[in-house]
Amino acid sequence: MQCVELNSGTQIKGAAGIIETKGLHHVYRGHEGDTHALGGIDIRIEEGDFVAIIGRNGSGKSTLAKHFNAILLPTEGRVLVLGMDTRDTGLLWSIRQAVGMVFQNPDNQIVATVIDEDVAFGPENLGVPTPEIAERVDAALRQVNMLALRHHAPHLLSGGQKQRVAIAGVLAMHPKLLVLDEATAMLDPVGRAEVIETILALRSIAKMTTVLITHHMDEAVLAHRVIVMDEGRVVASGTPAEVFAQPELLESLGLDVPLAAKLAKELIRSGLSLPEGILTAAQLVDSLCQFN
Amino acid sequence: MSMLQNVTLGQYFPGTSVVHRLDPRTKLGLALAYIIVLFIARTGLSYSVLALASAGIVLLSEVPIKLVLRGLRPILMILSLTVVLHVFTSREGVELVSFWFIRIYSGGVIQGFMLAFRLVLLVLSTSILTLTTSPIALTDAIELALRPLRRFGVPAHELAMMMTIALRFIPTLLEEAEKIMKAQLARGADFESGGLLKRAKSLLPLLIPLFISAFRRADELAMAMEARCYRGGEGRTKYKVLAYSRLDLYAAMCFTAVGVVALAL
Amino acid sequence: MPIQLNNVSFTYSPGTPFERHALRGINLSIADGEFIGIIGQTGSGKSTLVQLLNGLIKPTQGTVRVGDVTTTDKGVRLRPLRQMVGLVFQFAEHQLFAETVAADIAFGPLNLGLDPSEIAARVDEAMLTVGLPLEMKERSPFELSGGQMRRVAIAGVLAMRPQVLILDEPTAGLDPRGRDEILTRIGALHRERGITVILVSHSMEDIARLVSRIVVIHEGEVLHDGPPREVFCSAESLSGIGLGVPQATEILRRLRLAGWNVPAVALTLAEAHGFIVEAWRERSGEA
């Protein structure tokens, strides 16, 4: 069976978001009892969104991400991807083509022994004609700025470079949504910066709809919307400014608050007249200079 | 980071020689044909023709002779054993040496050396194949070569995919093995002293984490592959398609000539 | 257990086309009870450096002296050295192998040839030190959370009672709470037992919070060596080699560029807060 390419838009129902979950529950069955990983999630991700999902390890954020392309199926409730129900096995490959996933461990998602062959892996699976695969591979590697290393072996790359190759591998499938499931967690600061820069470039050039799952708050600050999860539920959601204005909540959940946000809050408490919603060092310094 | 990253796999020696540029299927086919001719050939003259052909290919491949000969190192033991066994056990031909219980006959000496020579040529031909063909190209060739056997239930695509993944993960796992070994050494482990049993047991702290990690990697890789719409060879297209060129035709013609001459002599 | 590195160089695969100089001419002395942070980019040579300290690798040039042991001496006994200098690798949970938590932690002491009662006592002690409840002893380490597995691995090294503890990126990949738990334990360990701790980390926040001396490694050489306040003064030099400064320091640096009269370095939020409030009042007074 050929994978249905979605660019024609035939599968997309009128008002469907890219992702819509309705009363989503997920239970892992194990020999030592069941784990209720997701306990009723209702979220919606629209075209063009940039959403960060934060939460502790075990809060359910990765489980949720794996529902976005039918790697996991709901125990209860529904997940709609461009209006397609993930439980409909006939739509499985269309769903997976539409939602590209980049995972945590850079070593465990590169299949081929040469970079460009790996990027071609997805399009090959989709049955894309050979000349077009070559175009897609070139374009995707250019988008992540890895074209120069196309003939290299993956095990000789740095962690950040491997993750950029993984992103290219997903882009070559022409997805509607890019999901990064803790894709920066195992990287050093340089690697993290490379990946984040790549995501921001994709946002600004290709308007790529993006879900970024992370426990680095300085990354979450870059999103348009932040969803905070704990024990399988959404406990807060809003713009980064709204979410990080609640440092007590975040700290009680075992999460960090960006230092600039915390410092701004304490400076206000000490009587400095600064605006609300400061998140980054640059914003704090600008405000300090402006209001003094 | 580590020295193990320098391990070259399948001993591929990159280059642009005529031999490198041949289609991997041609090379695979010719190497097989060469081996068949080698086993049919009976006379010293036939072997000489085949040896000359091998030498010519080595020269054309532009691979350093030292590297080609290195391929023989692992079989040196077998070679000497072959010669020794034949020399001391054969009772054919003229008696050359008779001393105490040792009897050496001319037939044994000739047979021993002929067999050793045949083994050397066999290993050389496969060495040239792997030295001039990248592991990926070889995998592709094997997949295509096995494709006609699919109707008999030979999983050509799956075998090729397994080989690709193995090639991809060998350096990663070697690096990991080195890391775990160092971590256990740092905890006072000793992998070297003691008897065989003790030494085998002392490897457990290395092997168990390595297996666990390999399984975890396999699991994660399977998920990543599925997420990228992998579902077997059905309906799959290819990024790099192999194509025969005029070169392949010439190579096949040359080889046929060599084969006919070798068998006629 | 003082450590002395004299003109140490290390080369991988010397004499081959893959030859790579990981360290060149390092001189370093570490006194008893110091808490040292080693920072440097991936590939700077810092992982090579720590492996030299317990004899896992030996310098191609120069000498490494730990206490009265020189690692390059003929017939040097490495096991006592590895007992004295405990090394926790990055993603240390990947080295766990035993069926139970207790058995895994006991591996080191067992290799030292201690008797069972002593081993049992050390397992308990190590578990408590890293904050693992003793009820976990009989559980399989592979059923634990990532942060707990990491702590089992650290306990496995602590059970050897090293006098020098080296930790390579002990918090990599952990969530903020897991990170804080481990760092707090390491800080307490240093305070209460007075052992030497060497922390290799990419996180300037972690380093600023704990250490009293920073060694910056760049391309196999020591670029800076001094107390945090001094090293973080060179923000430009650090960012030039892909390293940062703690966020509190970064905010002060930006304020100084904007003409504010604040000190160059703050290691904690509270410190930065104090400096900024003071400068704000000063400026308001002038206005």
Image (cartoon, rainbow, N blue to C red):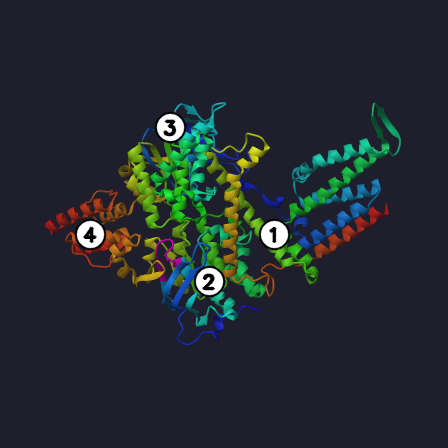
Residue appearing at x 31%, y 31% in the figure: C33
Quick check: marks 3 and 4 in contact, CB under 8 Å? no
Horizontal and vertical percent position of residue B120: 73, 40
Q: CA distance from mark 2 to mark 1?
A: 28 Å
Q: CA distance from mark 4 to mark 2?
A: 43 Å
Residue C195 counted in the magenta span:
no
| Closer mark to the observer between disc 2 and disc 1 | 2
| Residue bearing the label numbered 2 | A72
Residue A58 counted in the magenta span:
yes
Label ID, residue A266: 4
Q: Are marks 1 and 4 on the same chain?
A: no
Residue appearing at x 29%, y 45% in the figure: C246
Q: Are marks 2 and 1 on the same chain?
A: no
Instruction: Locate residue B55 relative to residue B93 in the image: left or right.
Output: left
Image quadrant holding the N terminus of chain C, namely top left
Task: Give the SS element for disc 2.
Answer: loop
Q: Nearer the viewer, residue A133 or A265?
A: A265
Residue C217, can we see it? Answer: no
| Residue bearing the label numbered 3 | C3
Label ID, residue B163: 1
Q: CA distance from mark 1 to mark 4?
A: 59 Å
Q: Which residues are magenta?
A: A51-61
CA neighbours of label 1 inside 10 A, class few (<14), some (14 to 19), many (20+): some
CA neighbours of label 4 inside 10 A, class few (<14), some (14 to 19), many (20+): some
| Closer mark to the observer between disc 4 and disc 2 | 2
Residue appearing at x 41%, y 45% in the figure: C149
Label ID, residue A231: none
Q: CA distance from mark 3 to mark 1?
A: 48 Å
Task: Give the SS element for disc 4.
Answer: helix
Kind of residue at badge 1: Met
